[in-house]
């Protein structure tokens, strides 16, 4: 049993656990404090000689410093350690806490919150950042800038989304995975890969299926709409109308590769995406660029470089002052 648990823990650090192994690890951690201490010790041995990578690769010490400034636990504070005082090797304590409530996570640039009297778990990817979360059932979730998911710990396969996320859902025929949005639409799936853009302040909701099958419900009380791979459903919250079309699904999850894509996008929507992507607030002259649409993909450009590119099309000037940007007519 000892060797089995040790192997499960090592696979947890390497993010290679099966859902069954995660459940076994959770039960083991809940047995007694000695198991939690052992977990910390194994984590120390594993991580002191390694650099933890997410996406392009993030130095663990730098990532922990950034993460610790953003982590907060808001329920039953007496039960939770003061994370800001933990040294780097004690990052295992955070992971142990996550596992003990039925959830594992790798989220080096995001924020973790525990809310609603300890019954709900919320992950937030702040503006200007992208994050990845591994749920206890094996489902992987990528969160785009200014996005969040929340779910009840008693029902971890039903999540609420505000923002944009890519889901790689672990298959479970007995328990469908459900994504709820603020527009009262929900997406039902057993095991698949798909992208959802559902910011509460956006007029359009987009669901794009890469693999598997999903159904979208709550669509003006009509029967569920079923998507096939390579299909996208766009829903207009104002008109209540939807449109089903064939697309290249990889183009709609390209943000995971740190690429910002515009496809015949109105200037007003371009500005909104820039605000989220670079975590800035833009003040825009009314009516500026109203007739302009943009089609391009941005990868490593700075905010200033992107604004210079846009100014080739829109007759504008801009001023950057920290996190504030002013765009006006020339």
Image: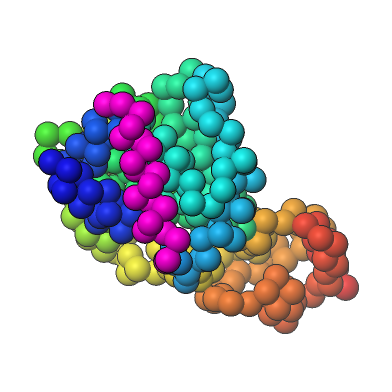
Front residue of 269 and 273: 273
What residue do we see at 36% from left, 58% from top? Answer: 46
- Main SS category, magenta section: helix
**Residue 97 placed where, x, y %?**
41, 35
What residue do we see at 67% from left, 56% from top? Answer: 279
* In the rendered image, the vertical position of residue 164 relative to residue 81, given as above or below: below
What residue do we see at 35% from left, 68% from top? Answer: 250
Q: Is residue 237 visible?
A: no
What residue do we see at 42% from left, 53% from top? Answer: 44
The residue segment tinted magenta is: 31-50
* In the rendered image, the vertical position of residue 129 relative to residue 242, given as above or below: below
**Residue 256 placed where, x, y %?**
44, 64
The answer to whether residue 294 is magenta is no
**In the visual, does 258 lie left or right of 275?**
left
The answer to whether residue 36 is magenta is yes
Residue lying furthest right: 330
> Which quadrant of the view contains residue 151?
top left
**Quadrant location of the C terminus?**
bottom right
């Amino acid at each position: 049993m000892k060797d089995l648990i040790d192997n499960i823990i090592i696979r947890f650090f390497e993010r290679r656990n099966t859902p069954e192994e995660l459940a076994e690890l959770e039960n083991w951690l809940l047995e007694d404090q000695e198991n939690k201490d052992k977990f910390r010790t194994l984590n120390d041995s594993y991580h002191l000689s390694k650099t933890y990578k997410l996406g392009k690769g993030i130095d663990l010490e730098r990532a922990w410093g950034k993460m610790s400034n953003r982590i907060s636990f808001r329920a039953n504070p007496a039960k939770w350690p003061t994370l800001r005082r933990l040294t780097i090797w004690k990052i295992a304590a955070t992971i142990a806490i996550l596992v003990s409530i039925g959830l594992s996570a790798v989220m080096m640039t995001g924020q973790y919150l525990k809310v609603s009297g300890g019954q709900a778990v919320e992950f937030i990817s702040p503006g200007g950042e992208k994050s990845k979360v591994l749920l206890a059932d094996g489902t992987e979730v990528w969160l785009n800038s200014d996005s969040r998911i929340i779910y009840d710990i008693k029902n971890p396969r039903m999540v609420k989304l505000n923002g944009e996320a890519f889901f790689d859902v672990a298959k479970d025929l007995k328990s469908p995975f459900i994504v709820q949005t603020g527009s009262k639409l929900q997406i039902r799936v057993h095991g698949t890969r798909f992208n959802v853009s559902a910011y509460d302040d956006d007029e359009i909701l987009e669901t794009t299926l890469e693999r598997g099958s999903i159904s979208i419900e709550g669509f003006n009380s009509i029967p569920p709409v079923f998507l096939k791979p390579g299909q996208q459903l766009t829903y207009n919250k104002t008109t209540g109308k939807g449109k089903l079309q064939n697309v290249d699904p990889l183009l709609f999850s390209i943000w995971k590769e740190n690429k910002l894509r515009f496809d015949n996008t109105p200037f007003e929507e371009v500005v909104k995406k820039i605000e989220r992507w670079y975590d800035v607030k833009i003040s825009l002259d009314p009516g500026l660029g109203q007739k302009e649409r943009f089609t391009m993909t941005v990868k490593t450009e700075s905010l200033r470089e992107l604004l210079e590119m846009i100014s080739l099309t829109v007759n504008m000037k801009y001023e950057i002052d920290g996190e504030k940007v002013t765009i006006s007519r020339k």
